[in-house]
Image (tube, grey):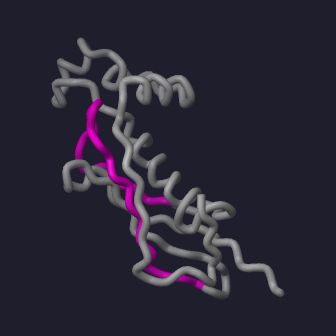
């Protein structure tokens, strides 16, 4: 984990992480959140839907965005203030998801940083949105 301070950030700066969605991820996410929608957990049920197979919880991909913000950019000490999300395509078991955040604005007076957020599978957006975080300031010397 790296820690960046407000003073280290610039518009256009970005970071990402890549995760492959597994069966265990869906089961664990359902257990932690209580979201046991059968489209995520029951193959027979999911086969009857428009997707034809199980899909990952949308918020699992959103969680990958949170991971980038909390561990890399800006990293430890960042406080999530808001997040908008638009779910564009389903994510399936075995998909490799790239979560990317890009600084779009910095409010130095309030220590607020706005990020474009996206998750991609095979180069196509599955989630798009915008996040605002409070970034830690470097301690005065």
Taking 112 as reference, is 126 left or right? Answer: left
- Considering the whole magenta stretch, tell me its main secondary structure: strand
- Residue at x 38%, y 35% (from the top left corner): 57
Q: Is residue 66 left or right of residue 127?
A: right
The location of residue 25, given as percent across then percent down, is 43, 29
Q: Position of residue 23 (x, y in %)?
A: 37, 24
Foreground residue among 64 and 127? 64
> In the figure, 37 relative to 72: above or below?
above
Question: Where's the C terminus, which quadrant?
Answer: bottom right
Q: Is residue 96 magenta?
A: yes
Q: Which residues are magenta?
A: 83-107
Residue 78 falls in image quadrant: bottom right
Looking at the image, residue 18 sits to the left or right of residue 133; the answer is: left
Which quarter of the image is occupied by the N terminus?
A: bottom right
* Residue 85 coordinates in the image, percent (x, y): 39, 55
Residue under the image location 53 percent in, 23 percent down: 31
Identified at 53% across, 25% down, the residue is 34
Q: Is residue 87 above or below residue 72?
A: above
**In the image as oriented, which residue stretches furthest toward the front?**
1
């Amino acid at each position: 984990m790296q820690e960046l301070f407000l003073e280290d950030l610039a518009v256009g700066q970005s970071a990402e992480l890549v995760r492959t969605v597994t069966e265990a991820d869906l089961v664990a996410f359902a257990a932690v959140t209580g979201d046991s929608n059968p489209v995520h957990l029951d193959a027979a049920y999911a086969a009857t839907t428009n997707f034809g197979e199980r899909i990952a919880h949308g918020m699992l991909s959103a969680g990958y965005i949170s991971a980038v913000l909390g561990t890399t950019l800006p990293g430890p000490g960042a406080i999530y203030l808001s997040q908008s999300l638009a779910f564009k395509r389903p994510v399936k078991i075995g998909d490799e998801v790239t979560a990317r955040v890009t600084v779009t604005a910095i409010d130095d007076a309030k220590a607020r940083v706005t990020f474009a957020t996206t998750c991609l599978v095979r180069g196509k957006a599955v989630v798009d949105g915008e996040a605002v975080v409070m970034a830690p300031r470097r301690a005065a010397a």
